[in-house]
Image: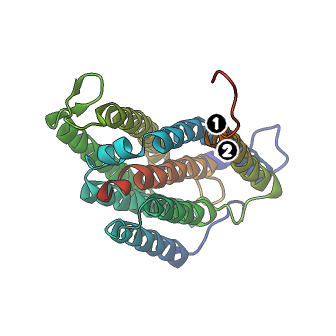
Amino acid sequence: MISPVFYTRNYVLAYVGLLGLLLLSALLAFINMGWVNMFVALAIAAMQGAILALVMMHGLFEKVLVRLIIGGALLWFAILFTLTFADYITRGWVPIAGK
Amino acid sequence: MASESLALREQFGSPGHQRDTSAVGMWLFLATEVLFFGGLFVGFGVYRMYYTQGFVEGAREMTLVIGSINTAVLFTSCLTMSLAIRSMSQGNQFRTYVLLLITIGIGLAFIALKFVEYYFHYKAHKVPGIWFESSSLYAGAEELFLVYYFVLTGLHVIHLSIGIGITAVMAVRTAIGRFSASWHTPLEVTGIYWHFVDIIWCFLYAIFYIPGFHK
């Protein structure tokens, strides 16, 4: 077979998992955890993204080149995120005269 | 079969080689999309760090119920899209066609719900730069939150609309018998794009709808 596919039950299981995570995310929004709320929501979103990428998009079946592209995209995003926040978070840490 | 003769281009050694090349092309495009949306997500994060209270007040304008229903709607479209591709891999042309039409319908339902939500924001005078009123001490930051909200969700709707258009083309091509069980790469690549648009929405839901409940 040329195209990678799962059995129907795998797609249905992934779908149920996605809905379960959505329910969990919505329910946790009612619990006051302060700034942790959004990070929990983002972690759940990352899990949903992983299910979509690995099962629905057949990421599990793709060849090494595609995995490298996915890894490269995530790495570049991590660099963008880390360097930007490293800059903004550390501003003011070092006292500079006249600033 | 017409689809077989149209399938393999001369520069490829085998249908598998051609399929892998198409998939790599789509994944490369999606890598650029990660950075496109990534810049906006990082910008949102930086401003949220600086103007936390204003952003939380902005998030209170969101309707968790509509956002959650829309998320479930998109997940359902993911299932129907995946099942459509699976049906084609089994050679079931009619079922694929029906599932693609359902996917298009669900995508349109998402956009309709999104515009209902936009209308609520308009009625509440929460359209930044055009129709915005707030008595909050953090009105400026609240407006900035709404700028990110409209830009990011607007871009998402544009991406989804493109996905609906491409899926409609795939439905027509399925109906006229251009795909077969052994060759349906364009359909598969469309599916990869469709699911990516849903992944973006997962993160939009997390940053816009969840933080509005607590100070």
In this view, which residue lies farthest toward the front? Answer: A97
As displayed, is residue B65 above or below residue B148?
below
Query: In the visual, does A26 lie left or right of B40?
Result: left
Q: Which mark is residue A6?
A: none
Is B137 left, or right, of B160 in this rendering?
Answer: left
What secondary structure is marked by label 1?
A: loop
* Label 2 crowd (10 A; few <14 / some 14-19 / many >=20): some
The residue lying at 29 percent from left, 22 percent from top is B129
Residue B27 falls left or right of residue A63:
left
The reply to whether residue A86 is visible in this rendering is yes
Which quarter of the rendered picture does the C terminus of chain B lie within? bottom left
Whichever of labels 2 and 1 marks the residue nearer the N terminus, that label is: 2
Q: Amino acid at mark 1?
A: Arg
Q: Front-most of A69 and B86?
A: A69
The residue that label 1 is drawn on is A91
Chain letter for mark 2, please. Answer: A
Amino acid marked by disc 2: Phe
Asked if the residue at tag 1 contacts the one at tag 2, i.e. Cβ–Cβ closer than 8 Å, the answer is no
Displayed quadrant of residue A28? bottom left
Kindly give the residue lying farthest to the left in the view shown. B123
The local secondary structure at tag 2 comes to helix
Please name which of the two marks, 2 or 1, marks the residue nearer to the observer: 1
Chain letter of mark 1 equals: A
Tell me which colouring the rendered structure shows.
rainbow
Q: Which residue is mark 2?
A: A77
